[in-house]
């Protein structure tokens, strides 16, 4: 069944049950992660503090893990010709021992240490600025449209995109890092663009609401298709290029960002053309009935 058929065939209230269920599932995922870790999504090293050590993959992954077993090893990844080891917070003396061991065993290992003070400062900034960016976006939307219900639909659709993308991070094991925070901020802007496109078409153009929604879909889905194609290309390059070209390594930051973006863009297609579209369909048709009743 085509998406265009859903727009006009089924009652809006009936279709809106689907996005409501998805939002509830996303909130359950985020809530469960919060109860187990103290954060709605798993935090990366930038926010928890710790050490990243990148070494040549001359041995098996099990041998490398055993070599560093006496240190708080959180994760080990094969990134092509190298292993990237992530360690949790440790004392300065323990960190000095770790760095000494890595330098003694491997030639030119890459060691990056993130202190707890800097990590807490980053956490505070994300907690402060991510909600603020969403709040300012909502204010701009309300100022532009001056229709409380239309503006609310745009904000709810954008919020649903962010919740779905964040829940996908828990499902795929992607941690919150500076890169994934940037991806979430990008999603806020992109989701508002598509919702504004739809809302402006419905409010400004003449004709049946369903026809105006279908007219906006051509432009909106083309935008989504080209963006998703670009993201898929980045996913392939960041995850699999090192298998073809041994001198390359896996681009973890790009891989994590594109994972968040692809789930967020898929959610945006659904929330724009189902959640927002059906909400507009219900609101606009209801408004027409109210006007007719007043005239009588």
Image (cartoon, rainbow, N blue to C red):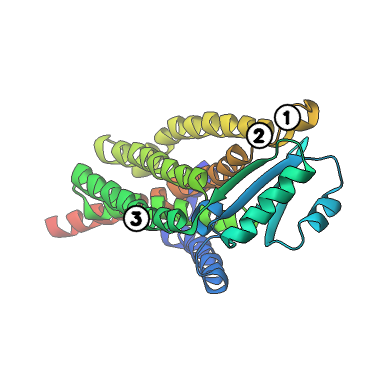
Asked whether disc 1 touches disc 3, contact meaning CB atoms under 8 Å apart, the reply is no
**Residue at the image point whose x is 69% and y is 42% from the top:** 54
Tell me whether the residue at label 2 lies in contact with that at label 1, contact meaning CB atoms closer than 8 angstroms.
yes
- Report crowding for label 2: few under 14, some 14 to 19, many 20 or more residues within 10 A (C-alpha): many
Q: Earlier in the sequence, mark 1 or mark 3?
A: 3
CA separation, marks 1 and 3?
36 Å
Residue 259: x and y in percent read 60, 44
**Image-based side of 71 in relation to 213, left or right:** right
Residue in the picture at 47% in, 57% down: 163
- In screen coordinates, is 179 left or right of 285? right
Q: SS of the residue at dot 1?
A: helix
The residue labelled by disc 2 is 238
Q: Quadrant of residue 193?
A: top left
Q: Which residue is mark 1?
A: 241
| Alpha carbon separation for disc pair 3 and 2 | 29 Å
Q: Is 75 located above or below residue 268 in the figure?
A: below
Q: Position of residue 276 (x, y in %)?
A: 39, 50
Residue 12, horizontal then vertical, whole percent: 42, 57
CA–CA distance in space, label 2 to label 1:
6 Å
Q: Which residue is mark 3?
A: 131
């Amino acid at each position: 069944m085509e998406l265009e058929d859903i727009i006009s065939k089924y009652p809006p209230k009936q279709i809106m049950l689907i996005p409501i269920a998805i939002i509830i599932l996303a909130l359950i995922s985020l809530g469960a992660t919060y109860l187990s870790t103290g954060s709605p999504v798993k935090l990366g090293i930038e926010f928890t503090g710790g050490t990243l050590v990148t070494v040549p993959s001359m041995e098996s992954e099990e041998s490398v893990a055993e070599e560093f077993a006496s240190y708080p090893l959180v994760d080990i990844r094969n990134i092509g010709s190298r292993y990237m080891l992530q360690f949790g917070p440790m004392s300065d003396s323990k960190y000095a021992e770790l760095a000494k061991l890595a330098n003694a065993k491997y030639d030119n290992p890459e060691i990056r240490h993130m202190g707890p003070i800097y990590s807490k400062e980053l956490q505070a900034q994300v907690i402060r600025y991510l909600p603020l960016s969403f709040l300012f976006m909502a204010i701009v939307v309300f100022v532009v449209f001056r229709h409380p219900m239309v503006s609310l639909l745009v904000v709810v659709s954008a919020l649903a995109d962010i919740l779905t993308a964040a829940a996908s991070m828990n499902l795929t094991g992607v941690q919150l890092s500076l890169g994934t925070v940037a991806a979430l901020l990008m999603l806020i802007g992109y989701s508002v663009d598509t919702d504004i496109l739809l809302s402006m078409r419905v409010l400004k153009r003449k004709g049946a609401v369903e026809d105006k929604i279908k007219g906006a879909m051509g432009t909106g889905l083309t935008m989504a298709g080209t963006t998703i194609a670009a993201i898929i290309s980045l996913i392939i390059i960041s995850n699999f290029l090192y298998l073809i070209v041994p001198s390359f390594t896996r681009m973890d930051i790009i891989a994590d960002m594109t994972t968040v973006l692809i789930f967020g863009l898929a959610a945006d297609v659904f929330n724009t053309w189902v959640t927002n579209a059906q909400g507009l369909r219900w609101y606009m048709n209801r408004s027409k009935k109210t006007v007719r009743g007043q005239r009588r």
